[in-house]
Amino acid sequence: MTTMPILDIQNLTIAFQQNGQQRVVVENLSLSIAKGETLALVGESGSGKSVTALSVLRLLPSPPVVYTSGDILFNGESLLNADEKILRQHRGNSISMIFQEPMVSLNPLHQIEKQLSEVLIIHRGMRKEAARGEILDVLDRVGLRDAQKRLNAYPHQLSGGERQRVMIAMAILTKPSLLIADEPTTALDVSVQAQILTLLKELKQEMNMSLLFITHNLNIVRKLADNVAVMCQGKCVEQNQRDRLFNQPQHPYTQKLLDSEPSGRAIPLAESSGNLLEIKNLSIGFPISGGFLKPKSVRQAVNKISFSIRKGESLGLVGESGSGKSTTGLALLRLLKSQGEIVFDGQPLQTLNMRQMLPYRSRIQIVFQDPFSALNPRLTVSQIIAEGLEVHQSLTKEQRETQVINTMIEVGLDPDTRHRYPTEFSGGQRQRISIARALILHPELLILDEPTSSLDRTVQAQILALLKKLQQQHQLTYLFISHDLQVIRSLCHKIVVMRNGEIVEQGDCETVFNAPQHTYTQNLLANSH
């Protein structure tokens, strides 16, 4: 007797309706997940993975979304034909979801404890006081440091990885039967990633929970999945048991995915290259309110770090979420107050006011970690990419348009889509828009804050190849912030390892990878395989 699957997607076709026309984004998709099973859904950005996941709980607005054929069954019950009352019973209760972009999903006006408490109050009828203990326990399990102190924090006061851990905690608080995880470990370093994967495995075993896991990270698929479905351009091109798919991929696209792991090494650096950027004893602290009649204390995010980057060199800055990597990048642009020395091309930046900094802002550009938050939803892609040109260069409208088109082609975007808005693009495409916006000014130093974390492996390989090509052509210098050690090794000359706001190890990339000295670096490398 065959057991009924907990989730059964049958011949599902999803389209977007606009101006009387339908654009199909998912076509005749059939997937099923058994009780206690993990199905990994992989494929490139824009292949329909997230649209499929959001459709399970009917979270996409209809219109413009239309389901032209098929059905989605949960324990044999149709979700596509269910009314709002039934859907509300399932949402966040029997079916939970971890969303791809935590900054967009968390309420910026509410503290973390309030947002997590709401889940337990609404779904399990718990009192706020009783909920706190359970909240602290789950935050500890997902690896949020100093959980007790972070309960009163707002989302913007957490790092990208910390926000992601809060989202994971929120999703598992109700102990759902089915957990849909849309790129849940994207912003996490490999050690915390390993911790989250272990946690998900434990929860699966404890609750016989099923898991639909959407990812582009094939290492995670190897460790977590029972079965794998591969999507390409809205269609499922291959489904198989995990080991069979990795050992004997049948479809050319699956073979291409498996062959797209980061490889190669940094381009050779001229011996005569001098330092472009020098950081000496950089410290960054954030004031913490002490409450009524209590003095404010300071949380030290970065503590007296020093490193330098030569012209044309790539330096990889790695470490766990909350270690101070992104904070360091923002301080270099003087977007955060800091102590210590920041010297760019021989010029100390610490003494400059905002007006004096303006010429350096075109020479130092940044690609932010969360592309959705970094892109203005009211501007078209063309306007977003051209923003810097309007500030720093005097060009005609036609000249700006030409530069926008050329830059979009360089980063692998269709220039015909330049009049669309960010919401009309996938997560990976939005990241490429962010890269294009930074590249269009031809900067000397590019600070890249997790620029490939939301990209599938095939697109990631294209972006890395593009960054290497641009570096060779223009002698670009990169500060590459990432938790993906394979990416760091393929692009960077030097590596700096941070933990708790301090540098624990730094040196030549190959030396650190082959003979790491610090225990933390050794653990990072061990968990990256």
Image: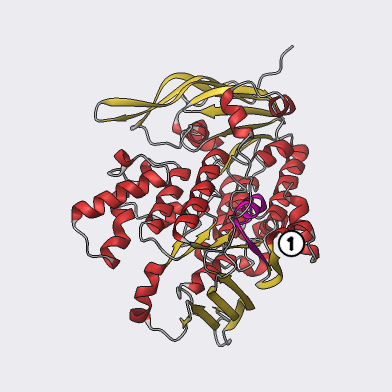
- Reading the image, the residue beneath label 1 is 512
**Considering the numbered disc 1 on the image, is that residue within a helix, a strand or a loop?**
helix
493 relative to 70 in the view: left or right: right
Q: Residue at x 56, y 58 (%)?
A: 160
Depicted 82 relative to depicted 107: above or below: above
464 relative to 321 in the view: left or right: left
Q: Amino acid at mark 1?
A: Val
Task: Look at the image and say whether residue 494 sits in the magenta stretch.
Answer: yes
Residue in the foreground of this view, choosing between 249 and 509: 509
Depicted 354 relative to depicted 500: above or below: below
Depicted 185 relative to depicted 78: above or below: below
Quadrant in the picture for the N terminus = top right
Q: Residue at x 69, y 64 (%)?
A: 508
Expressed as whole percent of the image width and height from the top left, the position of residue 78 reads 52, 22
Q: Is residue 380 visible?
A: no
Q: Residue at x 38, y 78 (%)?
A: 357
13 relative to 195 in the view: left or right: left
Expressed as whole percent of the image width and height from the top left, the position of residue 424 reads 36, 41
Residue in the foreground of this view, choosing between 295 and 250: 250
Q: Residue furthest top?
A: 1
Depicted 353 relative to depicted 163: above or below: below
Expressed as whole percent of the image width and height from the top left, the position of residue 104 reads 46, 52
Number of callouts in the render? 1
Give the crowd class for mark 1: few <14, some 14-19, many >=20 residues within 10 Å: many
Q: Is residue 136 visible?
A: yes
366 relative to 423 in the view: left or right: right
Task: Look at the image and say whether residue 134 sits in the magenta stretch.
Answer: no
Which residues fall within the magenta stretch? 482-497
